[in-house]
Amino acid sequence: MDVRVTSDAAAFERTVFPFLQDDPVLHTIIMGNVHQRAHDPRAEAGESYFVSVHDGDVIGVAMRTPGRAVYLGALRADLAESVADAYADVLPELSGVAGDQPAARRFADRWCERRGGQATETKGTRLHKLVEHKPLSADAGRPRLMKDDEVDLVGHWAMDGFAEELGGNYREWAEKRLREGTMWIWEADGEPVSMAGYHLPVYGACRVGPVYTPPEQRRHGYAGALTSHVTAEILAQGNQACLYTDLANPTSNKIYHQAGYRPVADFVDVEFTA
């Protein structure tokens, strides 16, 4: 078995995408991040480390983008210790690891064995794939694309609910969504009350998110109706739709089930502390 590390996103894409593209929904986070860094000159600064595991062909992948935890995705558990060793050889420190639970646990055990410290599971997430689109309605309002003057609003909403996705600059993040036309707003009585975005397709799969409604606007069906609309947009473009939910939030899991999404896989976040 051969474990390789690179910071060249384009080379990594050429190497591992023939393996990942067999299931672009299951591998949506890795494929989306790698593709962006390989092709977008405005991708966030900082060095990323990509790992591929080979046994003749590619049999596993992982990534670590600047300032974040290692992401294993659906990595096989028996490969996790070798991947942890590869990252320990190039990273002086690491905040954590995320991925399929058995793999994340074995990675964490190996990392702590080599570097010390403790590992704590902090969050569980579930990947869902759309099986049958079912439109949802809200108490009032309608969907529309984000407007030019809503960059700060969208950025601040994302900071409140999804700060880890912003790459350090909420305004640049929101401006990118505006340029792409991938952020939708639910408007009720002339006021923006919810937002839902999606990631550009990679091998025909689009990941919905982030979805956010300010606390004072919740329980009116806005997020569900907007997610359903965004899902319809993705399908109209000829792509598959998928999304992640927080396992600690039964409300969102119920809503997305009603919209036609069904579970694919569960993942866990593990945090490292000294």
Image: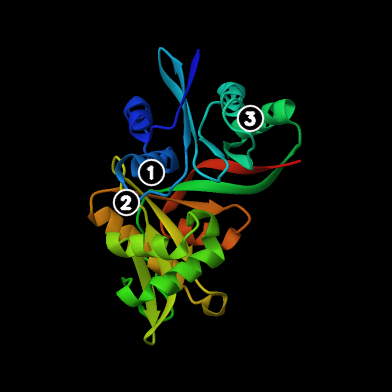
Q: In which quarter of the image is the C terminus?
A: top right
The reply to whether discs 2 and 3 touch (Cβ–Cβ < 8 Å) is no
* Quadrant of the rendered image containing residue 86: top right
Find numbered disc 3 in the image and state the secondary structure of the residue it sits on.
helix
Residues at marks 2 and 1, CA–CA distance in whole angstroms? 8 Å
Residue identified by numbered label 1: 32
Task: Name which residue type carries label 1.
Answer: Gly
Marked residue nearer the N-terminal end (1 or 3): 1
- Whole-percent x, y for residue 49 in the image: 48, 33
Q: Residue 27 appears in which quarter of the rendering?
A: top left
What amino acid is at disc 3?
A: Phe
Task: Check disc 2 and report its element: helix, strand or loop.
Answer: loop
Q: Distance between the residues labelled 1 and 3?
A: 23 Å
- Residue 107's disc number: 3
Classify mark 2: residues with Cα within 10 Å, few (<14), some (14-19) or many (20+): some
> Quadrant location of residue 219?
bottom right
Query: 86 and 139: which one is in front?
Result: 86
| Residue that label 2 marks | 200
Q: Which residue is drawn at 59% across and 32% down?
A: 91
